[in-house]
Image (cartoon, grey):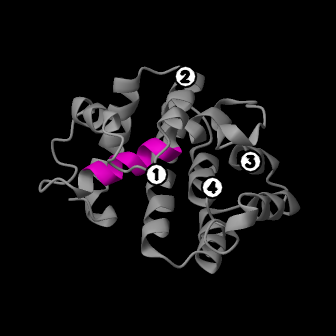
Amino acid sequence: MTKPEAREILENWTKTDSLLRHARSVELVMEAYGKHFGEDSEEWAITGLLHDADYEKYPEEHPNKIVALLREKGEEKIAHAISVHYTKWGVSYENLLDKALLACDELTGFIIACCQVRPEGANGLTPKSVKKKLKQKSFAAKVERDEIEAGVSLLEVELDEHIRFIINVLEQNKEELGIG
């Protein structure tokens, strides 16, 4: 599967700007992590882009619709990673791609939320600031902190290092993501 094919699937099923921006931000972070780990960065980017592709159109069936479509297209590795991007689904983590998607999804969305409440956006955002906001349960209350912790643990990265990595990717793309 190519990125343009993945983008077409996403845009056919997803219409809201916020969810499209979330998909794009996770795509960018996953692509950067793919390069960082010496993996197939395009496959990682597509995984990030499509992880919530069915969420808006088929909320009760998420992620089953996108997983089934990817399996039909022979994209088993991407399909499996998407099927495990929430620990409560109880699917086993088989590889680095699976773990990275879990580690990046909620935290990327949370960091975007942090940027949105700052006059300077992503500019100068620090891991310390993000961790302080994580402790405020009322801030971005829908973000599941236990999912962030599980992802960081499975990916075997330090929280500060992981936050800094995501901030750097988002900061490089701040204009496109509207957090500049």
The spot of residue 33 in percent (x, y) is 50, 37
Of residues 126 and 142, the one nearer the viewer is: 142
- Give the residue at x 78% y 37%: 91
User: Marks 4 and 1, Cα distance to the nearest angstrom?
Assistant: 18 Å
1 and 3 marks in contact (CB < 8 Å)? no
Q: Residues within 10 Å of mark 4 (few under 14, many from 20)?
A: many
* Image quadrant containing the C terminus: bottom left
Residue positioned 62% across, 33% down in the render: 99
Question: Can residue 51 be seen?
Answer: yes
- SS for dot 3: helix
Alpha carbon distance from label 4 to label 3: 8 Å
Identify the residue at horizontal 22%, vertical 35% (top origin): 129
User: Which residue corresponds to mark 3?
Assistant: 83
Disc number for residue 51 = 4
On the image, numbered disc 1 is attached to which residue? Answer: 142
Earlier residue among tags 4 and 1: 4
Neighbour tally class for label 1: few under 14, some 14-19, many 20 plus, Cα within 10 Å: few
Between disc 2 and disc 1, the foreground one is 1
Image vertical order of residue 120 relative to residue 18, above or below: above
Give the mark nearer the N terminus: 2 vs 1. 1
Q: How many marks?
A: 4
Q: Is residue 30 above or below residue 65?
A: above
Give the crowd class for mark 3: few <14, some 14-19, many >=20 residues within 10 Å: many
Taking depth in this image into account, of 4 and 130 the one nearest to the observer is 130
Secondary structure mostly seen in magenta is helix
Q: Position of residue 177 (x, y in %)?
A: 33, 62
Q: Which residues are magenta?
A: 105-114
Cα gap from disc 2 to disc 3, whole angstroms: 18 Å
Q: Which residue in the protein does label 2 denote?
A: 153
Q: Mark 2: few, some, or many residues within 10 Å (few <14, many ≥20)?
A: some
